[in-house]
Amino acid sequence: QVQLVESGGGLVPPGGSLRLSCAASERLFSGYTLGWYRQAPGKQRELVARSTTAGITTYADSVKGRFTISRDNAKNTVYLQMNSLKPEDTAVYYCNTAPQSIWQWGQGTQVTVSS
């Protein structure tokens, strides 16, 4: 069973930045399209960014131009650089395969954007 460990969340003011990391135990990590998802209170989990095996990235309109997904296949790690954070970015952030999640979800990392 693949294990996912997200980290890097925290409390930041509007306009701030955070860099999230997600380490996976899957040795075939490089063979998957990976994504960052988020779930705000009372809302469904949504896919906000994904990176194909070739490094092609796509983003939800709500984060385009502010978030950047990247991956280090040698370290089995995917990152999410988040800039110009807004209060509406507040959520628990998760990583998984994309666009369909096939691995067991990790615990996620809480991002709170508030002054």
Image (cartoon, rainbow, N blue to C red):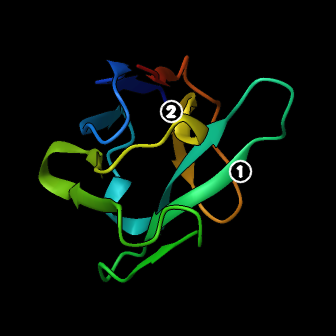
Amino acid identity at mark 1: Glu
State the mark number for residue 36: none
Percent across and percent down for residue 10 are: 35, 17
**Residue for badge 2:** 2
Q: Nearer the viewer, residue 101 or 41?
A: 41
Q: Residues within 10 Å of mark 1 (few under 14, many from 20)?
A: some
Q: From the viewer's perspective, tell me whether residue 6 is left or right of residue 37.
A: left
Amino acid identity at mark 2: Val
In this picture, is 69 found above or below 16? below
Name the quadrant of the C terminus. Answer: top left
Name the quadrant of the N terminus. Answer: top right
Q: Nearer the viewer, residue 86 or 101?
A: 86
Q: Nearer the viewer, residue 74 or 44?
A: 44
**Image point (28%, 50%), residue name:** 83
State the mark number for residue 46: 1
Say whether residue 1 is visible. Answer: no
